[in-house]
């Protein structure tokens, strides 16, 4: 059948513009962090120096070998790169989209605390911060 156009359509090409609406379409946190680091023209060693986390760990995060980086590291990197911590934490799956998720009460206390605080709205977080501040002031006296 020479000369006839093929009726078989080619597979659609993936879009260059990702859609982050669906859970499976969220970017990999490591990739976002790598792009932000490069944008700020920082080496891994410089980031290590600034936040105190080893460049080996940071490299593993950027390459996606560590998919859920320590939330404190995410916070420090979001500050350093000028990124939104809440968004990074969501993409790193520290915040669950599933309201029936049962893992909120498992794991170490820091993980539980971070997961629960990230579920609060801004007003609730402000209340928690005032409470923590009062505990810290009480402890100093």
Image: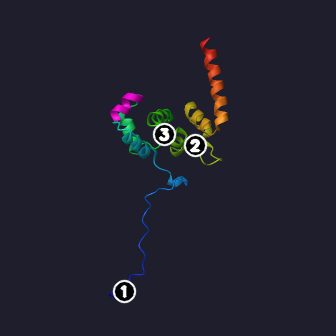
- Whether the magenta-drawn stretch holds residue 48 is answered as yes
Q: Position of residue 122 (x, y in %)?
A: 64, 36
Span highlighted in magenta in the image: 44-51
Q: Colour scheme in the image? A: rainbow
What residue lies at 53% left-to-right and 43% top-to-bottom? 87
For marks 2 and 1, give the CA distance. Answer: 53 Å
Spatial CA distance of label 3 from label 2 is 17 Å
Whichever of labels 3 and 2 marks the residue nearer the N terminus, that label is 3
Q: Which residue position holds label 1?
A: 4
- Tell me the quarter of the image containing the C terminus: top right
Q: Secondary structure at mark 2?
A: loop
Who's the residue at 37% across and 31% down the image? 48
Q: Nearer the viewer, mark 3 or mark 2?
A: 3
Comparing labels 1 and 3, the label whose residue is closer to the camera = 3
Asked if 27 appears above or below 117 in the picture, the reply is below
Going from N to C along the chain, the mark reached first, 1 or 3, is 1
Q: How far apart in space, not on screen, are marks 1 and 3 (Cα)?
A: 53 Å
Q: Secondary structure at mark 3?
A: loop
Element type where label 1 sits in the image: loop
**112 displayed left or right of 60:** right
Q: Is residue 10 magenta?
A: no
Which quadrant is home to the N terminus? Answer: bottom left
Locate residue 86: give its quadrant. top right
Which of 130/103 is in front? 130
Residue on which disc 2 sits: 95
Residue 21 point in image, percent of width and height:
55, 54
Badge 1: residue crowd in 10 Å (few <14, some 14–19, many ≥20): few
x, y percent for residue 25: 50, 54
Q: Determine which quarter of the picture holds residue 116.
A: top right
Discs 2/1, front: 1
């Amino acid at each position: 059948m020479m000369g006839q156009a093929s009726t078989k359509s080619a597979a659609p090409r993936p879009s260059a513009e990702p859609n982050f609406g669906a859970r499976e379409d969220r970017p990999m946190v490591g990739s976002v962090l790598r792009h932000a680091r490069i944008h700020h023209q920082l080496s891994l060693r410089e980031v290590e120096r600034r936040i105190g986390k080893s460049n080996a760990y940071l490299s593993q995060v950027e390459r996606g070998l560590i998919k859920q980086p320590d939330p404190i590291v995410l916070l420090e990197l979001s500050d350093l790169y000028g990124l939104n911590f809440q968004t990074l934490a969501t993409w790193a799956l520290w915040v669950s989209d599933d309201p029936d998720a049962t893992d909120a009460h498992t794991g170490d206390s820091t993980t539980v605390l971070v997961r629960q605080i990230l579920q609060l709205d801004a007003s609730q977080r402000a209340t928690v911060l005032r409470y923590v501040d009062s505990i810290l002031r009480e402890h100093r006296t």
